[in-house]
Image: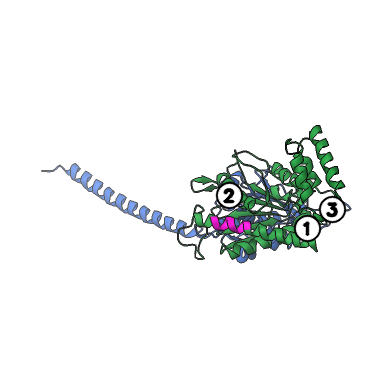
Chain colours: A green, B blue
Amino acid sequence: MRWIEVMWRESSDSGASSSFALRTAGQITTGSHNRRGWFRAMAALLAITASGPIFAQSPPAAPRFVVVLDAAHGGDDTGARLGGEAEKAYTLALSIRLRSLLMARGFAVVTTRESDATLEPDSRAQIANHANAQACISLHAAESGSGVHLFVSSLAPVQDARFLPWKTAQAAWIMRSLSFAGVVNSALSHATVPVTLGRTALPAIDSMSCAAVAIEVAPERSTDAQGPASLDDPDYQARVANALAAALVEWRSQAREDREQ
Amino acid sequence: MIPRHQTVLFIFLLAASIIMGVLLWNQLRRAHDRLLRGEDSAPTQAPLVTPAEQATLMVANDADNTVQPRILSLPLPQNPEARAQAILGKLLDLYAAPDAAHAVPGGASSIAQVFLVPIADAKGSVMANGPQLAVVNLTGAFVAGHPSGLETESLTVLSICSTLNANLPRVTQVRFLVDGQPRVTLAGHADLTRTYLTNENATADVGAHP
């Protein structure tokens, strides 16, 4: 951990060279390379490597745990009508709220959109796949049904392969996605949010190469479907967002346990 | 004093009026009888051109995100494609009912056609009783009126695929068209460019299609 920090300080005067430091730590990020920053980073790396005791005493850095939040729809694609609000606005607000919760818990969060922008399903999957994420969540909302509808891709699972067809890349991750859905289901149930599980054919997550689920938030209705129910209930929104954050914390700890074994 | 010829004319006209009245009353009664006979011969029930058979409809429920079988007795044609269209039409009639658990407007007229295409095996040969691909052509009005949502769209696709498989076991794959043209999604979510399997995992994909 220490050598990464030193590298970061050595190269912090150049934003471009920071990408080199992250790549050294095992993460894949994009960014341009600055020759001056690259030499400085290499020099720092050699200097730190030469000081054997420091390197030997420092445990290897834990890879960042990257989560991709995909706020569905946007721009011309308004999605469903939720009373007086469009689905695209609701999913964006939920994405921003969840991003804050996750960053406060130490996650590296990548969002597919931060504004009311049109985004094709392929672009969403492209962002997720470039992020090399450990978890991907596609956020939706609807007026029908009750509670949270939790979906995993309906693609049939296949053996992991070096090359995957773009439109069915998720097939190699189905088992991981089902495990992730189980963790999310437990967290939502623990937060007393009604959950229904299902499989679906959603182009955005079908092309993602990560543990991916689609979450559709519907109003929380009682069992007899009577009484007022609204997606705008602040308490309900907070419970859903906190439950999703708790699920990702649990998923991260499970991933770390798997890595240590 | 009334002249004689005027008396004869009056009696003649009176007799003619009475005779004409009797004839008219008789004609009226005959016309009435003829009308009643005509009503009796009019069809009061729709003719049953096909016998009623049991059909299994896989009915979706938004409340619990499930698809449950419901067995109904329906007059079904013998032609497999017309049979598939009639069954799917009945399924969508249930969804168009006011108290439907999976409310989708449109009804039976939303299924424009159903085509059954034999599926060739790996060698390219087609068996007489081999598996079939069902191509379901939906109307644009149905798609335009379908509620947008991940759950509701997925349930519509799943219930159509499951219903086809329950009544036409040879149908193992389903594809969707809208007004005869491919369409990306049903109402913004469910993928309509895929080929769906109708076996135990009714929504599994067999590969993407360009």
**Callout 3: SS:** helix
What amino acid type is highlighted by mark number 1?
Pro
Q: Are marks 2 and 3 on the same chain?
A: yes
Q: CA distance from mark 3 to mark 1?
A: 47 Å
- Tell me if label 2 and label 1 are in contact, CB under 8 Å: no
User: SS for tag 1?
Assistant: loop
Q: In the rendered image, which quarter contains the C terminus of chain A?
A: bottom right
In this orientation, which residue lies closer to the viewer: A45 or A185? Answer: A45
Q: Chain of mark 1?
A: A
N-terminal-most mark, 2 or 1: 2
Q: Which residue is denoted by mark 1 in the rendering? A: A157
Both marks 2 and 1 on one chain: yes
SS of the residue under disc 2: helix
Instruction: Read off the magenta span.
Output: A238-245
Nearer the viewer's eye, disc 2 or disc 3?
Answer: 3
Q: Residues within 10 Å of mark 3 (few under 14, many from 20)?
A: few
Q: Is residue B168 visible?
A: no
The residue wearing badge 3 is A53
Above or below: residue B67 compared with residue A63: below
Label 2 or label 3, whichever comes before in sequence order:
3
- Asked if residue B62 can be seen in this view, the reply is yes
